Amino acid sequence: MFSSNRITKLLNIKYPIIQGAMAWVADADLAAAVSNGGGLGVIAAGNMPPELLERELVKVRSLTDRPFGLNIMLLSPTWQDALELAARHEVPVVTTGAGMPGKVIDRLAPLGVKVIPVIASVAHAERVKKQGAAAVIAEGIEAGGHIGEITTMALTSQVSDALDIPVAAAGGIADGRGMLAAFALGADGIQMGTRFVCASECNAHVSFKGKIISANDRSTVVTGRSLGHPVRSIKNKFTQAFHVMEEERVPIEDLDKFGSGKLKAAVVDGDVENGSVMSGQIAGLVSKIQPAAEIIEEIVREASERASRIGRRFD
Ligand code: TUI
């Protein structure tokens, strides 16, 4: 299965499933579990101090012999440190988010690192392809965290048509039906974040996982539109206070200050009321904690079973 799939061939993995990079959530333990399960595990550099990130890069190699990735979040003040660590540690795959990755590709592609930017529009996708991206992750507005404006449904088909490099779809995918839908739209693979938060190997606080498990389809909201940095998370005291401040047109610096440290508060300390519980709209579909390898096997089995049955709907 997937032996001629462009993502599995490019990344040298078994299943075309990339784990979404989630700051404070996606560490070496989660990345190794996903890679050992046949997907591509990804460590999120986020705003991590370089010494800590280096420890995770060493650790992941002690936990898996399979390919893994590092995500560089381009809004982070430490993104250049992460870039140098990726080069020094010969990370096989780098994904980027929240900006244009020209400098990342210029530095890493000559070293043989496959750079896969997350993009949110056809124009971004065409630009990063010209810059030398090995593939793209087309992420729709359904995703958690920092988001674009286009739905996964509309984005995936248009990006797949516009590019000849492999495309993974992200945003709103948490099971085999979502994977199959992404493939129907022209994707060669998927990226999933929210479902992997609820992997047993994920070190996010139990209360953070609990918020995802008890969420429904209407549980997430988007804050930060007025700042030009929209972020999707589960509705709570934090998002309500943020919305009030946005309506009152509180200065951007004050909003930034209010938001700072809130993701860590939720993920690490478990303060899921005053912290930012970033999650995709698909949280309502995530109902239990299970090993990453089991999540992957379940999704692949469901996608292939449905693929063989779906033709009958046209009879
Ligand atoms: O990056 C993400 N999702 C993220 S990053 C993040 S960390 C954070 N922490 C606190 C507050 C805010 C963020 C949480 N979630 N996804 C990838 C992604 N990239 N989504 C959208 C984009 C994107 C947007 C604009 C990519 C390129 C782009 O280009 C704009 C330009 O022209 O510079």
Image (cartoon, rainbow, N blue to C red):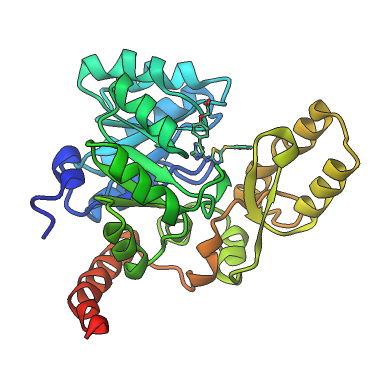
Q: With 175 as the anchor, is 246 left or right in this view?
A: right
Residue 210 in the image, given as x and y percentages of width and height: 59, 66
- Ligand 1, what quadrant? top right
Q: With 7 as the anchor, is 171 left or right in this view?
A: right
Observer-nearest of 27 and 179: 179
> In this rendering, is residue 305 above or below 203?
below
Residue 59 in the image, given as x and y percentages of width and height: 34, 36
Q: Residue furthest left?
A: 3
**Residue under the image location 55 percent in, 61 percent down:** 281
Observer-nearest of 291 and 312: 312
Observer-nearest of 141 and 311: 311
**Quadrant of the image for the C terminus?**
bottom left
Residue 50 in the image, given as x and y percentages of width and height: 48, 22
Query: Can you tell which quarter of the image residue 227 is in?
Result: top right
Q: With 8 as the anchor, is 183 left or right in this view?
A: right
> In this rendering, is residue 189 above or below 57?
below
Tally the marks.
0
**Residue under the image location 29 percent in, 27 percent down:** 133
Residue 268 in the image, given as x and y percentages of width and height: 61, 47
Residue 190, visible in the rendered structure = yes
Observer-nearest of 55 and 265: 265
**Quadrant of the image for the N terminus?**
bottom left
